[in-house]
Structure formats: C-alpha cells, structure tokens
Image: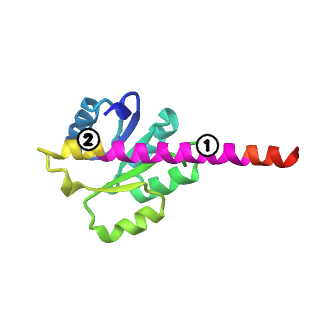
Amino acid sequence: MDSAVHCKVLLVEDSKFLRLTNERVLTRAGFEVFTAADGEEALQVANEKLPDIILLDMMLPKISGPEVLKALKKNPATMDIPVIVLTSLSQKNEEKLLSEGAAAYFEKSMLGLDQSSDRLASTVETVLERVNHQKSVDARLQKMAAAKKKAAGN
C-alpha cells in the first residue's frame, strides 16, 4: 500500500454516512482525503486541491455527477486527474461513463460495509498505479523520440 502514501483523494458523495465511512477507510489506507457533498463543491475543491484521483458519486445535488465529470475533463487544470465513478446505477452505464472520461467504475453495491473498504482502497491504488505507469511509458517514449530526433539532426 506504499502507493497510497501522500496521494490526495477527493471523495465526492452526498450521503453523509457513505462519505464519512469511505473517508475513514481511505485515510486508514494512507490517503490524504478531501471531501465534497455536492457537484458545485466538488469542482471547487478539485480546482483548489488538485487531487491525484477523484471518487465521484453520480447522483449529486446542485451539479450532477455526469456534469461534474464533463467539467473536470474540460478544465485544463483537472482534465488529467483520473476519476473513479461511484454509482448505484447498473453496468449498462459503464461504457458511457468510461467514454466520457471516467478512469474506472465502482458500483456502490460492491461497498458491502464489512469488506468493501479494502476493495475501494485497492481500486484507488490500482487506478493510480495504472495512471503512473502510463505517465512513465509516455515519458520514456518522449525521451526516445527526442533522442531519435537529435540523432537524425546530427
């Protein structure tokens, strides 16, 4: 669980019970957790804190989850932050959410409060590892391209 240390998570959930429960779980797993109870607050906190990852409920007051996701992906400051969608909607929406920029999908029914905590924390870690791996691959490809360009120029 070393990848969790010093990673900032924004947890967006309107249910106070789920927000507090998941915040406790993620904090215990070593994450620094910020929370938001509605879509408006989510966008504000995302811009201020620039978290490493966002857990986003879809059914939110003020600004809906799908609208928050679109706004995050349009904003240059937040567009590269991976978003895990938390929803109780069925999986038929998964493809649509992923195509709109979600990095992963987590069904709330999977949050059986006994063992769910570990599942949620490990989902966050898995997505962060995937994103970090992609960043390192991209950096290596850029370095190789620059070296090739330099060699061609000589």
Which quadrant would the C terminus be assigned to in this image? top right
Residue where numbered disc 2 is placed = 19
Which residue corresponds to the image point at 37% horizontal and 51% vertical from the top-left?
84
For disc 1, the marked residue is: 139
Question: x and y percent of residue 153 in the render?
Answer: 87, 46
Image coords of residue 53 (percent x, y):
42, 42
Determine whether the residue tagged by mark 2 lies in a helix, strand or loop: helix
Q: Report the amino acid beneath label 1.
A: Ala
Q: Is residue 128 magenta?
A: yes
The mark nearer the N terminus, 1 or 2, is 2
Q: Quadrant of residue 59?
A: bottom left
Residue at the location (47% across, 46% down)? 131
Magenta span contains residue 90? no
Which of the pair 150/80 is nearer the observer? 150
* Numbered range of the magenta stretch: 123-145
What residue is drawn where x is 25% and y is 60%? 88
* Residue at point 42%, 53% (across, down): 63
Question: Which SS does the magenta portion mostly show?
Answer: helix
Q: Nearer the viewer, residue 32 or 138?
A: 138
